[in-house]
Image (spheres, coloured by chain):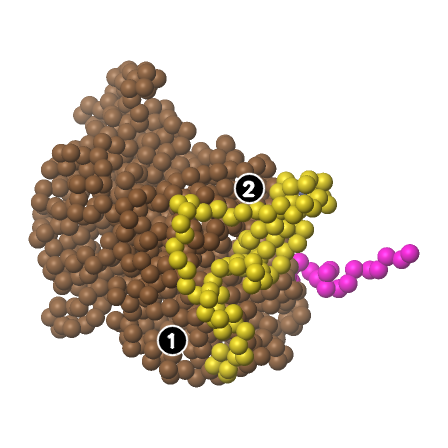
Chain colours: A brown, B yellow
Amino acid sequence: MTIAPETTSSAAPAGLYDTIRYGLIEIAREMNLSLMRSAFSPVVRDILDCTTAVHLKTEHGWEMVACFEGCMQHAFTSQHIANFTMDEWDLDRTEPGDVIFVNDPWRGAIHQSDVNLLRPIHIDGEVRAVLHSTSHVVDLGGPIPGGFSNGVETAFEEQLKFPPTLLYADDVPVRPAFNYLLENTRVPSMLLGDIRALYGCLVVGEGRLRDLLARYGTDTVFSAAQHAIDVTEASMRAGIRQIPDGDYRIEDFLDDDGVDSEPLPMVVTVKVRGDSMEIDFSGTGRQPRGNVGTAWVEATRCIEAVKMLVDPEPPVNSGTLRPIETILPPGSAVCVLPPSSCSNHMDVGSRSINMVVKAISGALVSKSIAADSGTCATIVMGGIDMRPGREGNQWGSFAGPGGGWGGTWKGDGLTYCIAPIGNCRTSVHEHAEAESPTVVGQMEVMPDSAGAGKHRGGFGGIYTMVAMSDTLVTITSDRVRHGADGVVGGGRGMSSYAWYIPQFDWSKHMNPRMLHGLEPLYGAFDENGVPSADRGSVEGGATNSTGKLAGVVVKAGDALRVVIGGGGGWGDPLERDLEAIANDVRDGLYSAGYAAEAFGVVFEDGEVRDVESRERRRHLAAEREAGRWTVPSASPTDWIL
Amino acid sequence: MGVDRLLFGPPQKATVSVERVRTGQTCPACGSSDVARYPVANFLGPRMVVKCQDCFENLETTVPTADDHWPPWASATSDWPASRNG
Ligand SMILES: [Zn+2]
């Protein structure tokens, strides 16, 4: 018997393969820069809620070999969108220069507002690649502007939904498709600019891909792509192998669905066997009446959590997804059936990722992480500009105030950071104020919002929008009933709130603790009207018992304040380093009042009193032992009513 | 396929779970008799798998048939001939 020498392809130099691998990522990056620079809406240009990807046909199907994301979730959802669409589309009828438009959540789209353009690429006469661009668009029709149709029950009441639809044929715009889009949006100029940018970046991508194929040869590029996916899979599997075999079950809930007031139960069981994983949502509540369910995206989006914890370094491609299978119970909140509404995907999405993080960090015991704010508290604003010189202009704008991440075994949680569902930025204030009749009154850290712990949570944020013209607002928020849970003895973060501020006065309304004259929109309040998740409830203290609102009108001269809560704490707050607490108090992050209540630290004239603090900590520990004290949820202790 | 898989009533049970149907097979990798068939989303999309529940050895992955109802919804036109416009 003779042993055949290795073929040249399997022995191809790793250096060449890596060059091509990063060449493919570079294509996605250049597509993304082109998209970001040429789009019209702040969602793409400033918030970077947009992603580009390169898919190649492999022996398995359509596999994403490279992407460049503005928003992390797209890196995980792109692959299924490409597969659903390419499986359904008749590629024999496809011509070079065709572009397919799709935004159907039951075909892998996140929600209707996240539109997808797919450009099949013919290589040697056969469709062997597809380029994908996606972004959230400011408005796509339906009764509620902006895409988060809180309070509705069916997809018929949400933004326009497109099954795979030809948008360009032979690089010529399909006029009926464009007319349909442009005649059904509140912001046709912005939408046209964005669609053209989403298309243009695909043309840029095709040029770069053809350059790469010409330079290295089609076979070599495809082999290198396969190699890139294989090594990514191997790296992910090595990460999963660190987790002990077992079934790790986590339960949590969403406050409500924006229609019914009952909490929506969510269950996830992460099953690990060697280097394979299942993420099973069995036991999750049935699809809600309101719009907080998701249709398909949790199939891959929740894998973000695994990636972050076990293999954060390598760029995401199809190999990241291969070791994991998800189980979505049909008719549950993570697999709603048509025609259920599903436009507010962000709360179920944030929570799913949070729960998978908790399950894995629990399995790794030594690496536990407390819960994060669990919501992005996205604020969608729009209306008709009445500022002099701009009268009659239709406008739309977004804000994404950050929340807090949970404290970890390693250190304090991140402050003012969007939930790990994505890594979008918020709007650039100067752009928002120039283009929209709004003034950003505040975008800053909410004091006393971080869950107490040996390693505290991250602090949440305040966003205050002052209206210069009447403004229609949608808010999607959660963790209004309770803040984010702590772990291993840590306390909860602050819960979420919103207030309407009539006749905003810069000299008196900038103190976030000052509630005099403010009208609570949602939040947990005690019987005296003091914000408190521990002593209060979401019923009675505010106009709404839900943090999912649509159709809020902020009159010109009035303001809206949204507070997004903080992350939970890690470990016993009575063991937190005194100097670290002193620093937080000096920085204005914690008040001396909350530091005394939750950390047992006594201040006098701004300085920590060591002896008194140690005594108070001993006392609180004894009270806790006797069942008379628990770590209070984060919240200011000095509200001014 | 027709239009019978476009619209659905809301589920009746308060919580929903996926059933793993035992196949009676033995796992070729670990010898376990706990082998089951069930719907998943794998890296490519919806699939039916036959897997050992003890070691996740994959005995079979298939594209769902109409009888699998996975996912429950389906395009009404998927088996129609395509026009130039799709
Ligand atoms: Zn087995």
> Whole-percent x and y of residue A468?
13, 61
Left or right side of A569 for A97: right
**Callout 1 crowding tier (Cα within 10 Å): few <14, some 14–19, many ≥20:** some
Q: Nearer the viewer, residue B3 or A226?
A: B3
Asked whether the viewer can see residue A349, the reply is no
Number of numbered discs on residues: 2
**Residue at label 1?**
A196
Q: Main secondary structure of the magenta part?
A: loop
In this rendering, would A573 be left or right of A127? left
Secondary structure beneath dot 2 equals strand
* Mark 2 and mark 1 on one chain: yes
Q: Nearer the viewer, mark 2 or mark 1?
A: 2
Label 1 C-beta lies within 8 Å of the nearest ligand 1 atom:
no
Task: Give the image location of residue A137, x and y in percent.
Answer: 34, 66
Specify the quarter for ligand 1: top right
The numbered disc on residue B81 is: none
Question: Mark 1 or mark 2, which is nearer the start of the sequence?
Answer: 1
Is label 2 in contact with label 1 (beta carbons under 8 Å)?
Answer: no
Q: Residue at x 38, y 75 (%)?
A: A196
Mark yes or no: residue A519 visible. yes
> The numbered mark 2 sits on a residue in which chain?
A
Quadrant of the snapshot with the N terminus of chain A:
bottom right
Asked if the magenta segment contains residue A479, the reply would be no
* Residue A194 position (above or below residue A43): below
Q: Which residues are magenta?
A: A1-20
> How far from the left and from the top, in percent, is residue A155?
35, 63
Subunit that carries the residue with mark 1: A
Q: Which residue is identified by label 2?
A: A271
User: Which amino acid lies under the numbered mark 2 shown in the image of this protein?
Assistant: Lys
Q: Residues within 10 Å of mark 2 (few under 14, many from 20)?
A: many
